[in-house]
Image: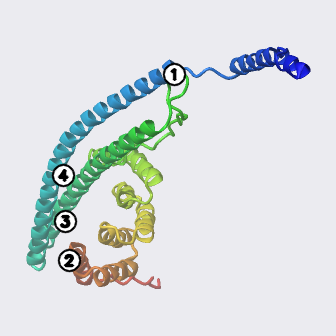
């Protein structure tokens, strides 16, 4: 009993040592664990919220500005459509006038044809402006969608350590000159009889925008320049390129008519007659078909003279 009681009251020397060792291990673990900057985390969250609010404010301002611009562009588009409709009505009136004077005077037909060509050029100009307005509307819509997508990405992605958003800026790729600017410049130089410069500019339209309808118009005007300069064979090749590459172009009937006129200028009477008949068959209701009928009548009224045979000298 005395031995048990003495052993029971004997102080334990291992407990304080174990406690000290445990506390040391806890301190070492605490030193090894990374510190959690609570204040820094809260500051980043506040800064991120502030940036999101600023982006929302900027988006609202841009949306209001875009609505105003879209309203203006829509008004311009409506006015341009009205102008094109008016031009189309004038062209229809010209066509009826040509049909009425076909039998009475062939000279008036050529005069009206020139007026119609000018009207077609004006229509081309209005269409180029309409394309420009439509592209501006599309650009505004894409800008608005990009801003909305950027706002959603910034709200959901964490900010980087230096405060800048993640991602790399792509270098802007070189772009072709604007189509409307190229075409209008070429058309203006063509009307001003600056044929060499206009031909180069129409070539740029074909080079940079080969799939656009205006590229077919550019081919036509290049052939017209060759025709006006008296290079009839080059003109025929240019009109043929238009008819092969852009068969549905609005200038196709005029190109076929010009081909017949070039063939006449080159003295190829039978080929010209065949070309005029092909034009009438393919585009029977076109103003150019009316002119083709007039040309065929003129050819029939002036048959070719037989060549005199060499006589015998006695």
Which quarter of the figure has residue 287? Answer: bottom left
Helix, strand or loop status at disc 3? helix
Q: Nearer the viewer, residue 15 or 50?
A: 15
Give the number of the disc on residue 113: 3
Give the number of the disc on residue 290: 2
Nearest to viewer (mark 1 / mark 3): 1
Distance CA(mark 1)–CA(mark 3):
83 Å
Residue 155 horizontal side relative to residue 285, left or right = right
Q: Is residue 209 above or below residue 246?
A: above
Residue 264, given in percent of the width and then of the height, sits at: 35, 72
What residue is shown with label 1?
38
Q: Nearer the viewer, residue 204 or 149?
A: 149
Counting residues from the N terminus, which is met first, the one under dot 4 or under dot 3?
4
What residue is shown with label 4?
77
Counting residues from the N terminus, which is met first, the one under dot 2 or under dot 4?
4
Nearest to viewer (mark 2 / mark 4): 4
Q: Is residue 14 above or below residue 304?
A: above
Counting residues from the N terminus, which is met first, the one under dot 1 or under dot 3?
1
Q: Look at the numbered discs 4 and 3 and tell me whether their residues touch, using CB distance below 8 Å.
A: no
The residue located at (72%, 20%) in the rendering is 26
Counting residues from the N terminus, which is met first, the one under dot 2 or under dot 3?
3
Distance CA(mark 4)–CA(mark 3):
29 Å
Helix, strand or loop status at disc 2? helix
Q: Residues within 10 Å of mark 4 (few under 14, many from 20)?
A: some
């Amino acid at each position: 009993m005395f031995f048990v009681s003495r052993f029971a009251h004997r102080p334990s020397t291992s407990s304080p040592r174990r406690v000290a060792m445990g506390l040391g291990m806890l301190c070492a673990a605490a030193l090894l664990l990374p510190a959690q900057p609570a204040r820094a985390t809260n500051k980043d969250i506040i800064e991120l919220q502030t940036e999101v609010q600023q982006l929302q404010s900027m988006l609202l301002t841009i949306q209001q500005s875009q609505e105003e611009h879209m309203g203006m562009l829509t008004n311009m588009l409506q006015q341009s459509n009205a102008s094109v409709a008016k031009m189309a009505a004038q062209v229809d009136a010209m066509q009826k006038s040509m049909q009425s004077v076909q039998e009475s005077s062939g000279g008036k037909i050529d005069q009206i044809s020139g007026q119609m060509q000018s009207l077609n050029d004006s229509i081309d100009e209005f269409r180029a402006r309409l394309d420009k307005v439509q592209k501006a509307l599309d650009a505004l819509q894409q800008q608005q969608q990009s801003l909305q997508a950027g706002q959603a990405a910034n709200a959901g992605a964490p900010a980087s350590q230096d405060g800048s958003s993640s991602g790399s800026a792509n270098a802007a790729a070189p772009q072709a000159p604007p189509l409307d600017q190229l075409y209008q410049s070429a058309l203006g130089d063509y009307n001003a009889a600056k044929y060499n410069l206009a031909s180069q500019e129409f070539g740029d339209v074909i080079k940079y925008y080969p799939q656009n309808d205006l590229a077919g118009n550019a081919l036509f005007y290049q052939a017209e320049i060759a025709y006006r300069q008296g290079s009839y064979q080059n003109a025929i090749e240019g009109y043929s390129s238009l008819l092969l590459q852009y068969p549905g172009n609005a200038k196709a009937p005029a190109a076929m008519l010009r081909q017949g006129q070039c063939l006449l200028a080159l003295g190829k009477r039978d080929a010209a007659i065949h070309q005029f008949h092909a034009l009438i068959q393919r585009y029977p209701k076109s103003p150019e078909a009316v002119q083709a009928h007039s040309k065929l009548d003129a050819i029939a009224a002036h048959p070719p003279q037989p060549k005199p045979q060499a006589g015998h000298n006695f």
